[in-house]
Amino acid sequence: MNVTLGVGMLGYAFMGKAHSRAFHDVLLLSPPLVPELVSISGRNRERVEEARARYGWAEAVLDWREQVVDPRVALFDNGGPNNLHAEPTIEAARNGKHVFCEKPLGLDAAEAHGMWRAAEDAGVVHMCGFNYRFVPAIRRARELVDSGALGEIVHFRARYLQSWGWEAPTDIWRFDRAQAGTGALVDLARYLCGEVAAVSATVRTYVEGHEVDDAFVATVEFENGAIGTLESSRLALGRVNQNTFELNGSQGSIAFDLERFDELRVSDGGAYRSERVTGDWWPPGHGLGWGDTFTLEVQLLLEAIAREGSVAPHGATFEDGYRVAEVCDAVLRSAESQKKEMIEYR
Amino acid sequence: MNVTLGVGMLGYAFMGKAHSRAFHDVLLLSPPLVPELVSISGRNRERVEEARARYGWAEAVLDWREQVVDPRVALFDNGGPNNLHAEPTIEAARNGKHVFCEKPLGLDAAEAHGMWRAAEDAGVVHMCGFNYRFVPAIRRARELVDSGALGEIVHFRARYLQSWGWEAPTDIWRFDRAQAGTGALVDLARYLCGEVAAVSATVRTYVEGHEVDDAFVATVEFENGAIGTLESSRLALGRVNQNTFELNGSQGSIAFDLERFDELRVSDGGAYRSERVTGDWWPPGHGLGWGDTFTLEVQLLLEAIAREGSVAPHGATFEDGYRVAEVCDAVLRSAESQKKEMIEYR
Amino acid sequence: MNVTLGVGMLGYAFMGKAHSRAFHDVLLLSPPLVPELVSISGRNRERVEEARARYGWAEAVLDWREQVVDPRVALFDNGGPNNLHAEPTIEAARNGKHVFCEKPLGLDAAEAHGMWRAAEDAGVVHMCGFNYRFVPAIRRARELVDSGALGEIVHFRARYLQSWGWEAPTDIWRFDRAQAGTGALVDLARYLCGEVAAVSATVRTYVEGHEVDDAFVATVEFENGAIGTLESSRLALGRVNQNTFELNGSQGSIAFDLERFDELRVSDGGAYRSERVTGDWWPPGHGLGWGDTFTLEVQLLLEAIAREGSVAPHGATFEDGYRVAEVCDAVLRSAESQKKEMIEYR
Amino acid sequence: MNVTLGVGMLGYAFMGKAHSRAFHDVLLLSPPLVPELVSISGRNRERVEEARARYGWAEAVLDWREQVVDPRVALFDNGGPNNLHAEPTIEAARNGKHVFCEKPLGLDAAEAHGMWRAAEDAGVVHMCGFNYRFVPAIRRARELVDSGALGEIVHFRARYLQSWGWEAPTDIWRFDRAQAGTGALVDLARYLCGEVAAVSATVRTYVEGHEVDDAFVATVEFENGAIGTLESSRLALGRVNQNTFELNGSQGSIAFDLERFDELRVSDGGAYRSERVTGDWWPPGHGLGWGDTFTLEVQLLLEAIAREGSVAPHGATFEDGYRVAEVCDAVLRSAESQKKEMIEYR
């Protein structure tokens, strides 16, 4: 338990906060490696120094290039803006650092593919931050699928609805977040239902001046024969952050709504029952919060590094990040072509 | 109040029961015309006689051709199987009878178009039985849309989920019901969000021996610029008869779930509130049932006949029945062509 | 099926409408006796005549004394104001009429006891209108209790919350309704959990000028050892007509909310599942409404009359009406004495 | 921000874990004092050492008497078993340590009173661990009450339902937890509705061998004139950890269910709306978990210590702990006397 792992992090905003907290809290879960917070980097000297002090990092640096060659750093954690995901992460991997990168992995499938190949070639452990997989109810959903209790899967439908699109000025942070949200939806579909084979999609920008699409709707076909719908919008008044899915199989069904974080609805063919799924940190029924998903994610990452293995299947690898990007690209292609697009992996 | 209206009905099964009850119960709503139940028809002598006695019809006849020329009959109500919707209804209209036909109007758009034109040419009142429009919460939803309270509509999503597909042998009744369900979903979309401009759809038959599709998923684009998803399945375990929709506008949103018949969720931009919408038959909060939607439907029909007008906009005319059929046809075309299909009206 | 039963009814307001509709609609359920609507009575000539015409009664009469001796009347249905429940009902029974009386049976336990004894002495069938017993989900709840599936019952909690108390002027109708509501809550407790042994209660009138208590809270002990709470208020803003209960046993639990009329939540020890309970009038999942409970109630009454038996256990007899009144009286005694009051039956 | 505050903690079990995590996580909230984890104490040498290592405390000690005189310790945090709440806490206060004690404050009102007086006499900051006050939705509820938006409060009803009572062997931990749960319910009532004036209660032990009551039901009267019900049970199958309340005022109502941690239902007189209340740690709609309530609690405590003030009104002081104990004692007295008991403070 006293073996430490040096961590260097890029990004001090939202994800900087979330990841820093996870590296602290994971200690309560008895991880095989103890994170040592070596350095945090960012371009704004004042803000990165403030983050360093508040979040407990030893050093603040202005250039990630220092981190990726720092011998004290064994794990490079990239929580920076989307357009800074690829280069620093690839450099870190090439320098033999394990890599942990926030979603979306790259700006498109090509970039994500490059990141995946770089990490594989370097032989390092890689993880893409699809933290929703660590919501206890979603993990339980996957276990039910894997157990065969639901039988053959026939339908999957999911939507991610928010309402900030009406009010917000366009800024980088929201732009990033919108892209991450779409990928998260696709990753959930893959995590629970397997690979996507084809999509037909329509995307729309309703609010003038928006540079990222406000909404998309899509039908999907999975390799296993299931069909479904995916939908994402930032214009759904009444919804702050609703992320809901339902999966139907030949033996049973499951349904989840992020607004009821601790609850998985399960049908074994008859009426849905509402199971409380709260993990085992606290006594039964005392739920976790959204921030705790990062702690569980980091715990799995530390375990994978300790045994020099993969974070799969419950953690998302860079391969998962790449495959999600292919589906996201196909959504845009279909919206353009007005026909069904097949997903093809390079 | 003592002016009567002679009614002849085709069909003695499920819809025979529902419509017969409505013709009785409507009396409590003080209709302008009092229905006189002249005759009920069907091919099985024993069953039609039993229905006659139980449901209070004066005569049982074996051939609808008698009814459509019977001078005592002013309204012909067609609740028979889908393949008997067109011919008897058209004959009745040509003989000057007002016509009330269950959904779907015809077996396809061409047939439905013929029915509509026949009724229009005959100058009779016509109504297609999209009784969901008479759920008080759905009527209230439409009123909110019409009032402008929701602003510009951007999204509509609806699904109709049942589970009997896994267990049932294929029979005519279920075949009919499946078709009616899909049309009902489309009619709701049109009733609340306006005409459908385009669809991209996938349909699937999972259970061997099924002659009608088990499920479809579709993205839709509306003439007003809104986008959305429609989905219907008979294979969704855990759902007995869920019919749910959500509509988002620039000023507010509404959401409904048939399993909560008396409730409309309404957002005026902030959090959803759960309004009880129970009509005004009983004291506030004492809800109606599904069967009562037929009574409200019949009341509107009697009012239209009394003033020689149309059942629009809250009742569905044969034009509505036809337009729904065009969308349903486009769903099938798109599933075949694997591309987006535009809706064109003849 | 052609044997008729002459009915005379007192009352043309809310309950006149509800009962009249039930006597019509019951025909669709193939009752053993066909109700013949002989006469409806009330003191306001114009309104009773209007009710007669609208609800399909043969005659309107101004004095119930005519009805209780009318040889054509075999069933006397008392849906009049509470202070007219006892005398007409007793007179009808003494004249050999079967009697059906709305809740509360009498104005207090003494009066209710007299009505019960009179009906018993006359040997007629008697029913008190606790129609909530005929909500399909509540009937199912009782069946689960009877089956032993829930084990030994340990807790019962129920509340009846409305909000009209803040806004309403005090009138007879609401006064009646408030009293009926409290009794209905008590009857549900008895129907599901058995006889009440003791109560401790507090009652309050908050709104000036109110002659009936606005709210009460009580703890109850049942003869079977269970404990629980009962609560009723007309001052609960946000609630239109919420009637909710939960019952816990050693093997399982059930929960119900009238605002989700078609749903019974059932735990067999684990998580609650939401069962759709919609009766069998319509296809699965198509629910009944509040008005339909009266139809089911009348059907059971007609069956009891046809076989010269009792409406128990699913219908409420006058004995039930009396026992409820004893509990209601004990609630008031306890509020006065500020101590626990035992229920004693005379 | 660099001023530290030495902390000594008693207890290494459930509360040891929860509090330790809070002292770490609070750093992300920029507290005015930085907790320095001086020592953790407990009687089991092996377990306290393991807790020390895992939770990041500098020293493990076997006797709390060392901690209460340790000059490095400025705050004594008592998360030990209930029967060890009074003596160590009083000793710490007498030695000038600020004191933080888990609920229930003492084993009865007399003991709790002594603790309160000791802390007051010593002039130290004192806090009783009613952490539910730090659920964001409950804090928001209190703010709505304080704002006057709900008008005059007329009703409060709350229940705390769990199901482990059927299965569990009687052990100290569960005994402690049961007592803490009842007090938490009473504290919530006081926090939202003001002081309790009187209670009528029934308590029951159903399961043989249980030394603590399995369940209680009570009616309560508040000093402000409101009435209500309180109920707690460990025998409610289907409920893992349900803590729910509803408060009705003359202008509006609020309702909460711990199983929907992030949601406060609010009525301003009309239909309830479901507000997402997720605090401001993360982006809107990303909720906190139960463990995070401790972090918010510790943050408030550190602020109070920094300004040498009280944790009131949002934190619970020892006076709150004492007043809760008086109500809990009255519940037991009433169950014995079978009459209403008034609360009198010494």
Image (tube, coloured by chain):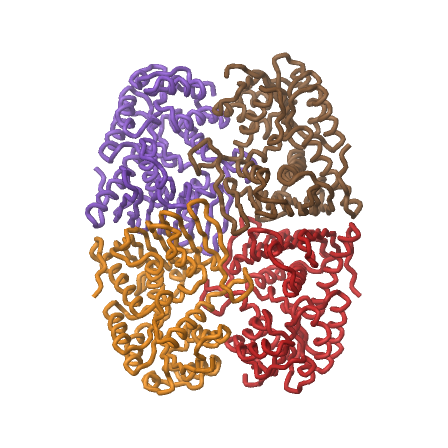
Chain colours: A orange, B purple, C brown, D red
Q: Quadrant of residue D58?
A: bottom right
Identified at 72% across, 53% down, the residue is D221
Whether residue B154 is visible, yes or no, is: no
Question: From the viewer's perspective, is residue C312 above or below residue D304?
Answer: above
Whether residue D105 is visible, yes or no, is: yes
Identified at 53% across, 26% down, the residue is C21
Of residues B9 and A70, the one nearer the viewer is A70
Say which quadrant the C terminus of chain B sits in: top left
Residue B198: x %, y % from top left: 25, 47
Residue C331: x %, y % from top left: 73, 42
Residue D281: x %, y % from top left: 49, 70
How many numbered marks appear?
Answer: 0
Q: Quadrant of residue A320?
A: bottom left
Residue B211: x %, y % from top left: 27, 37
Question: From the viewer's perspective, is residue A293 above or below residue C346?
Answer: below
Question: From the viewer's perspective, is residue A294 above or below residue A267?
Answer: below
Identified at 54% across, 65% down, the residue is A282
**Residue at the limit of the structure toward the top, as seen here:** C71
Identified at 76% across, 45% down, the residue is C335
Tell whether C293 sits left or right of C178: left
